[in-house]
Amino acid sequence: MSDIDFPTYLARQLQRYPRIVLAGARVPVSLLGEGAPESAGIDRDGAAMVDIVVEAGVVTRVMASGTGVSTETGDPVVELEGRHVWPLLVDAHAHLDKAHILGRAPESGGTHPGARAATTADRLAHWTRDDILRRMEFGLATADAHGVAAIRTHLDSHEGQAETTWEAFSEMRSRWRDRITLQAVGLVPIDAYGTAHGARLADIVAEHGGLMGGVTRASGGTHGAALEDIDLLLDRLFTLASERGLDIDLHVDEAASADALPHVARATIRHGYEGRVTCGHCCSLALLPEDVLSERIALIADAGLSIITLPAVNMYLQGREAGLTPRWRGVAPVKELSAAGIRVATAGDNCRDPFYAYGDHDMLDTWRQSVRILQLDHPYADAAAYAGPWPAAIMGIEHGAIRPGRPADLMVLEAWTLDQVIARPHSDRTILRKGVLANRAVPSYRGVGG
């Protein structure tokens, strides 16, 4: 079998046999839901050599490679020859409603205030139901082609916009339910919860089965500016969420100097919401003195907060000043957080909009960038989990890991080591959804404009 013919060969074998063994797969142990099988060989990158049995689109067994299951049962075998095999990945923080407006939105200058102003102008001018549906469809088709299993998207939910956007999202969630699991979060500046719109938004979110959300800054303001009434606003948000049984996902401290996170943690404890609150960004943690950071991490752990870092976008926005090279990375200290038992993940965030001019809804690419930016290597340890089981756990879904009983949603990479996974974009990856070849071309930009 030629390497060039591998996807076609694999597709034919999967179609021909209802039960098949994918032999000689190399899977990072952190992506194996039940850990490495006994006696499985582990390479120096922390990846196990396993055989994966797929039957009727479901993974039924994962065993140490070469244990003879095909000899015992006579099952047909596709020899993967040590290629990396990963589950389809999970993007736990995205903005599908903003995506792909870059070309038509006003120039942002690449700063957070500029991005906010440019997005607002575009929203007021263009965000009809049809416009949102068209751009979301493009984003999801792109994510599908790259092998994304699930996305949690934040939706701008300002007064006058929320109903339109949430109805469009609900339609897209139904349309894509067999391929990508979708969740949504209502996103408004936190001072909106001090108005009548806060309660109305909570009802909209509950109606569509979403999460309560917000950003810990005032309307028109920036992260870092002190909010004297932040505790009252958080209490209102948590009360609205609790009355409707909704979890919470917030944008927090997306700046070099900001201090809303302790308020969020204490509100979480105050309202008995431990384990039900996610905080994205948390960039200012990176610049705290070590003793203060240790205290902050202990508080986060007590509150059971989950933390999502968005390294590509935060490095694009943070520290941008005309004529100056940025001096810091703008990412959360995920190693320290993880060591304290706090759930962490990396995610894609924005895509071709004023908050981030680039991106392609590709979680494998996001993960590759994250490893380099966050230095999740030497050793790799659990690095792969940042884009698989850990964001899946934050979302409360059964994705992001290979284990018996789960659909055979897999990607096969032309890579034999983790440095090879990181070094290339892997446009030649082979995607399986429910055990069926699902290689699809990314959609042309002609169809989205912007």
Image: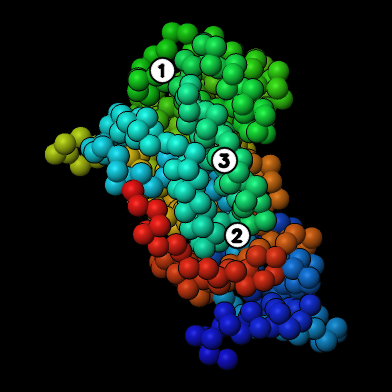
Q: Quadrant of residue 289?
A: top left
Give 170 or 46, whichever is nearer the viewer: 170
Q: Secondary structure at mark 1?
A: loop
Q: Do the numbered discs 2 and 3 sit on residues whose CB atoms are within 8 Å?
A: no
Q: Quadrant of residue 40?
A: bottom right
Mark 2: amino acid: Leu
Let me know if residue 108 appears in the view: yes
- Which quadrant is the N terminus positioned in? bottom right
Q: Residues within 10 Å of mark 1 (few under 14, many from 20)?
A: some
Mark 1: amino acid: Ala
Of badges 2 and 3, nearer the viewer stands 3
- For the residues marked 2 and 1, what is the alpha-carbon distance in whole angstroms? 37 Å
Of badges 3 and 1, nearer the viewer stands 3
Let me know if residue 363 appears in the view: no
Q: Quadrant of residue 228?
A: top left
Q: Residues within 10 Å of mark 3 (few under 14, many from 20)?
A: many
Q: Which mark is residue 169?
A: 3
How far across and how far down the image is residue 246, in percent? 67, 27
Residue at mark 1: 218
User: How many numbered markers are drawn?
Assistant: 3
How far across and how far down the image is residue 186, in percent? 55, 29
Is residue 331 shown above or below 202? below
Farthest residue to the left: give it: 323
Q: Residue at x 46, y 64 (%)?
A: 442
Q: Secondary structure at mark 2?
A: loop
Mark 3: amino acid: Phe
Residue at mark 2: 88
